[in-house]
Amino acid sequence: MIRKLVLICFTLFLILSSINSIQATETQAESMKNGKITWPKSQALPTFAKAKHLDVLDLRENTGDEKLLFTTLQGNVNREKPRIYMIENDYEEGNFTWLNDWNIPYSIRENPWELLLKYKDELSGMIVYDPEVKDSINVATTMAGLEQGGVVASPELAEKLTKPPYNLKIIEDLRGQFDDGLDAYKWQYENLWPRTTKRMLVGLNPHRSVELPEDNWDDFQVIVEEEEEIRDSSNRDIYDLDLSEFLEGESVYLRFQDAFTKDGWGGPAVHQVTVKADGQVIAQFIPGQAEEAPYLYDGYHSSADERYGGHRWADNGNYFIYRFTPPANTEELVVSVDMWNQFKVSASNVQPVAAGETEPYGYLRDYAVANRAMVFWLESNVAEEKELFEQIMSDVEPNTPYLGWFSNDVAGEFSSTELASEHSVYVLAADWFNNMTVFSGVKGKIKKQKPIAAPELDNKIYLTFTFGEGDNLQYNQHKLRQLWDDKARGSVPINWTTSPLLYDVAPSILGYYQQTATDNDLLIAGPSGAGYIYPTPWPDDTFDLFARQTKRYMKRTGMDIIYALNRVDEQNVPLTESKVQDYLDYVDPQGMFLSWESNTGTSILNNELPQSILRGVSSVSEAKEAIADASRDWDGDSPLFISLGDVIVVSYTIRRCRNCRITELRI
C-alpha cells in the first residue's frame, strides 16, 4: 500500500512538474515573441525597451489608410525597440514638444515609403481589410499583432504594396468574410481571442471623422443667437426663421451649434421643425424620429432621444445641420423651430463639407499591435454587442485595463464604464494617445511630491480648484501640456488630476509635470485611482486588487489625494461605507474629491476619510454663481470649504472673490 501511494505521489509530481515546465516555456515563448517588452506581474502596463534613435514620420497630409498602415508598421517595429515616431495631426502641445524634451536623437523622414522599405525585412505581409465592413479594420489590427510583422492595408494600398519594390505578400484578405461589425467581432472572439494577450483590452472606433476645411463655415450667416447663458427651458419658444435671402441656391443649410462652447452646458435643444415654402408645409418632423432622417445633412456628434417628447441637441464644439430643398421659384422660405437653451443658428445656400465622412486612423493601434491585444468596438447600449462585450470582460482576470474609449459619447461613457466596473475592469481613456510604444520606452525623472502642510484655519471661505480630466491619458499627453505651459500657471493654487499609471505608460510625461510643478501645483490621482472606475458597481470581492494597485502607484508618484466618480444606472451616487473602508484599508489617501455636477460640501466618511464634493464649473460666471450658492447660508462662525472643478480663467474668479482665501484643500 505504501509503495502504491509513493508511486501515485511520484506520478502526480511528474505531472505537476510537466505542467509547470510547459507553463514556464509558454511564458518564456510569449516574452520572446514580444521582443524586449517587459511586463512583470506587479506592473499595470508594460515597459518598452529604451529608445536610442527615432525615425520621425510626418503623416499629417497622408490619407487615413496610410496612417493605419504606418501605425501598424510602427507597432511591429517598436515591439523590439522603439524606433518610429509618428505625427498624425497637429497636436495641442506642439508636434515636436515632447521629442525636443527628450535627449534622444531623431531624424525626420520626408518619404514614408522609403521608411517602409527600411523596415521591410521586419515585415511578413499584409492583412487587407474590407471597406464594406469598417469594423474589419479592428480585426485586421488584431491580426497584424498576432502575425509577426503584419501590417493593415486597404485594398488599394495592398495592390500597390504587392508590386516592386515592396513585394509584400497578402497574409489574409478579409473582404467578403463578414456580414457586419458584430459578425466580425464574433469571428474574432472565436478565432483570435485565444491567441491574444489577456492582460489588456483595447477599444477603438475603426473610423474617425475627416478634418473639415478651414473655410467650411465662411458662407454661413448667423440668423438667431441666444446671448445669455440660459440653463433651463425659460427661453423655449417657437422661433420663426426667415431664410428667403438664401434661396439663390438649390438647397438651404441650417446649422445649430452651442452659443457658449466653454461653459460646459448644453447647446441648442430642438424639439420640432416645420418648414414652409410660400406658406405651404414642405417638411415637418420631431428630431430623433424617422421623419427627420431625410433632412439631417450632418449630425456631427449631436445626440437625439425621446425625452421631452423628442429632441436633438449639441454642446461644446458639436453641431448639426439640416438641409431643405424648396420647390423651384420659391420666393419665401420660413423654418419654425421649437427650441431652447444656448442656441446659435446660422444658414447658407452653399453646401459645406459634412463631418459624416470618415476615414481610418492610427493613434493607439501601435500599442495594440506591439502587445498583441485584441481590438474591438462594442456598444454597451445594444443588447447583442453588450453580450459579447461582457463575455470578453468575463474572460480576463479582475483588475484588467481597458484602453481606448466607447461609442455613443456621454451615454456610452456612463453605461460602458459602469459595465466595465461591474466586471472588475478599469478604463484608461487613450484612443487619441499617439506613439505610446515610444513613450513607454522613454525614461522620466520621477520624484515624489512633498506633502503639503495643512494651514491653520480661520473663519473664512476656502476655495479649491481642480482640473478633472486626469484619468485621460491623451489629455495628459496633449491638452494638459498646453495648459501647463501657460505662463500664468503657478499664480493660483490648482489641483491637477493625473493618471498614476503614467509611471508605466509615459514616465517622461509624469516626470515633466513633477519637475516643473510650482508650490501652487498639486498632482492628484484622476478618477477613481489607478484607472477610471465607478467604485459602487465594482464587485466587493475584487475591489482590493484595484485599491492595492492604486496604493502602489500613488506611493511611487507621491500622490495622496483621489478624485473619484461614482455612478449607478448613469446617476451620481455617494460612496458606500464598504467602498470607503476599502479605500481606507488599502489606499489610505489624505482625502478624496467626489465629482458632482450641481452641489458641493465637505464631510468625514466612516469617521476617518475627508471627502469634498466637487461642483463642476466651466466659466467665470458659473464659478461666481457656485460660490454664491455654497456660501449663501454661511454664518461666518466656522471655516467653509468650497470645491470647484474644471474651472476656466480661474484668476478672474479669484480677483472678484473679496472674502475668499485660496488654498489647496486639506482637512
Image (cartoon, helix red, strand yellow):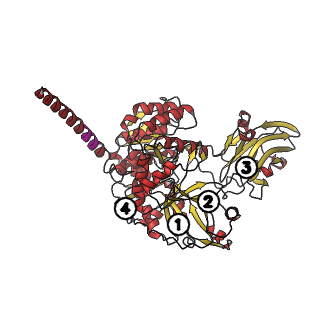
Count neighbours of disc 1 (C-alpha within 10 A) and say few if under 14, some if 14 to 19, many if 20 or more: some
Callout 4: SS = loop
Q: Which residue is mark 3?
A: 268
Residue 244 among those drawn in magenta: no
Taking depth in this image into account, of 275 and 48 the one nearest to the observer is 48
Mark earlier in primary sequence (2, 4): 4
Count neighbours of disc 2 (C-alpha within 10 A) and say few if under 14, some if 14 to 19, many if 20 or more: some
Instruction: Establish if 560 lies above or below 279.
Output: below
- Residue at mark 4 to residue at mark 3: CA–CA distance: 46 Å
Q: Residue 471, position in %: x, y?
A: 50, 54
Query: Residue at the spot x=49%, y=54% of the render?
Result: 473
Query: For the magenta stretch, what is the residue range?
Result: 22-29
Query: Residue at the spot x=20%, y=32% of the render?
Result: 15
Which residue type does callout 2 highlight? Gly
Which residue type does callout 1 highlight? Arg
Instruction: Locate the N terminus by quadrant.
Output: top left
Does residue 429 appear in the picture of this structure? no
Report the predominant secondary structure element of the magenta stretch.
Answer: helix
Q: Which residue is mark 2?
A: 601
Which residue type does callout 3 highlight? Pro
Q: Residue 426, position in %: x, y?
A: 47, 47
- Residue at mark 1 to residue at mark 2: CA–CA distance: 14 Å
Callout 2: SS = strand
Callout 3: SS = strand
Which residue type does callout 4 highlight? Lys
- Residue at mark 1 to residue at mark 4: CA–CA distance: 32 Å
Give the image quarter of residue 165: top left
Give the number of the mark in front: 2 or 4: 2
Q: Residue 229, position in %: x, y?
A: 74, 58
Q: Which residue is mark 1?
A: 666
Which mark identifies residue 443?
4
Callout 1: SS = loop
